[in-house]
Image (cartoon, rainbow, N blue to C red):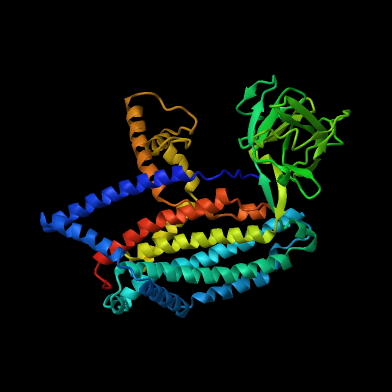
Amino acid sequence: MSFDPVAFSLWPAVLVWLQVVGVSLALALVVGFGGAVASHGFRGFGVAFGEIVAGFRDLFSLSLGRIYALAKLTFLEAIRRKALLVFVVFAILFMFAGWFITDTGQKAALQVKVHVIFVTWTLSTLSLVVVMLLACWGIPEDIRVRSIHTVVTKPARRLEIVLGRILGFSGIATVVLAVMASVGYVWLNRQVPPESQSELTCRRPIYGAISFLDRTGDPAKFGINVGDTWMFRSYIEGSSKARAIWNFPGVSASSLDADENLQLESRFQAFRSHKGTMDRQLLYRFEFVNPEKELRVPYKLMEVAEFIGSTETVPRKIRPDGGVKEYDLINDLVDSKGNLQVEVSCVDPGQYLGMARPDLFIRTPDAPFLAGYFKSVVGIWLMLLLVVILGVSASTFVKGPVATLLTFCIVVIGQVFRELLDKVAKGTQEGGGLFESIYRLIAHMNPTTPVPDGLATQVMKTVDRGLENLLWVFRQILPDFSYFNMAPYIANGFDVPFDAAVLPSIVVVMAYFIPCVIIAYYSLRLRELEAK
């Protein structure tokens, strides 16, 4: 498991949203009033203020009936434009996909992963293409054929047109996705081999906070770096005082299974400095600790199951090796705050055990696969809603091809190049900023070589920092589409966490709805409804 789900912080995100929207609104007002004054002189202040007042008047004069009528009209137009032909492509893909992706020789977990990734990728890709084209070409096409004049001459306000379009395209996206997702779920259950059906599950893990002790037993921020270029895991040294310590919150009797056992699932990695014992894997041990009672209960030795993971069934009544007294896992080892502390040590001398925060978790009773599958479909649906909002907004001030290209670029940058954009905006990208990278290319310097000190270097880095600040604003404006990709959770057999995936997806859609509707309303209100 290479992902590390972290709970989404709602209020810091709201504060950043308020800052970005406030700055953008201030710039829009300055540009708007400035353009009005440049066109109409000082009378432009009254013209710009009148448009703002008209916007508030339309907001408080909205008619749900007119919005519903426009949404229904948009829905029917999408069907007449052959939007449902996507089902034909979908059916063809699913009819022949089993020939190419089913391999009974693969491991059960890998078979499930391949099938789940195929289904979710097909759902998101096909529905995204259809919805993007509909949303970006709807209003420009109405303007081209002048059918929008029939609407605007009625008592329908521009804001109602925008909301009706968004609601109508969202409705067609919902229908398309619901049908394809239902077929995809049935296909999954029929196509996955019977011996792999047990992997169609949704683990509900309890993750803990991880800390380390070095080989002398002193606290450390990380473990040992064994030279792996991927710094996801840290390693602890075998046969020493080095430990990896997990603190699991919210542990109670409800965390146990039906047989009163605690399921601890681990996915540790081994690093060998010598061959060691060839007839077994590396050995490690759990030790349950209650600091409040100064109680330490060691558990039995276990072998590392590399690349596949292992689940250890820990009974509620624990008796240490060679001990007589039994300890109750919940009553004796869980502290008063509901935290369970587990220490992991490597037994073999000269060997190293690698681990990260999600490499050990408490596996509570599993949820049905349908629950995780439904949440992943909800993630795709929320992504489609965002694409509809962006596409309709773009189509109010540019033509269909340009709106499609603009929306497509936003999706690609927000989903594929988001990590690179984050590194550049934060100044953590190797090689520095724009001008430093250009200097390194000209001077044939690799990214790790320090740039010579001097006035020119200081000026270059100062300009790069200014560009990084502009990129920070650009980064905040672009949506992060990585939240909507929930397929890795169910593909690896995990339930989709609400606080780390579903909640941020909902927040992203809501965050872009209000600004985009305002932009679309004024763009449609201030433009000439003629095809140019």
Q: Is residue 197 left or right of residue 92?
A: right
- Would you identify the image quadrant in which residue 93 lies? bottom right
Residue 426 in the image: state x and y as whole percent.
44, 38
Residue drawn at point x = 69 percent, y = 19 percent: 216
Pick the residue in front: 433 or 521: 521
Residue drawn at point x = 40 percent, y = 36 percent: 442
Q: Is residue 323 above or below residue 279?
A: above
Residue 110 appears in view: yes
Pick the residue in front: 367 or 250: 250
Pick the residue in front: 338 or 429: 338
Residue 295 in the image: state x and y as whole percent.
75, 26
| Count of labels in the image | 0
Q: Is residue 33 above or below residue 241?
A: below
Residue drawn at point x = 15 percent, y = 57 percent: 46
Q: Is residue 299 left or right of residue 493?
A: right
Q: Residue furthest top?
A: 216
Q: Is residue 470 left or right of residue 212?
A: left
Quadrant of the drawing holding the C terminus: bottom left
Residue 325 in the image: state x and y as whole percent.
86, 30
Q: Is residue 230 above or below residue 24?
A: above
Residue 40 in the image: state x and y as whole percent.
12, 58
Quadrant of the drawing holding the N terminus: top right
- Would you identify the image quadrant in which residue 525 lies? bottom left
Residue drawn at point x = 49 percent, y = 62 percent: 384
Q: Is residue 139 left or right of residue 303?
A: left
Residue 224 appears in view: no
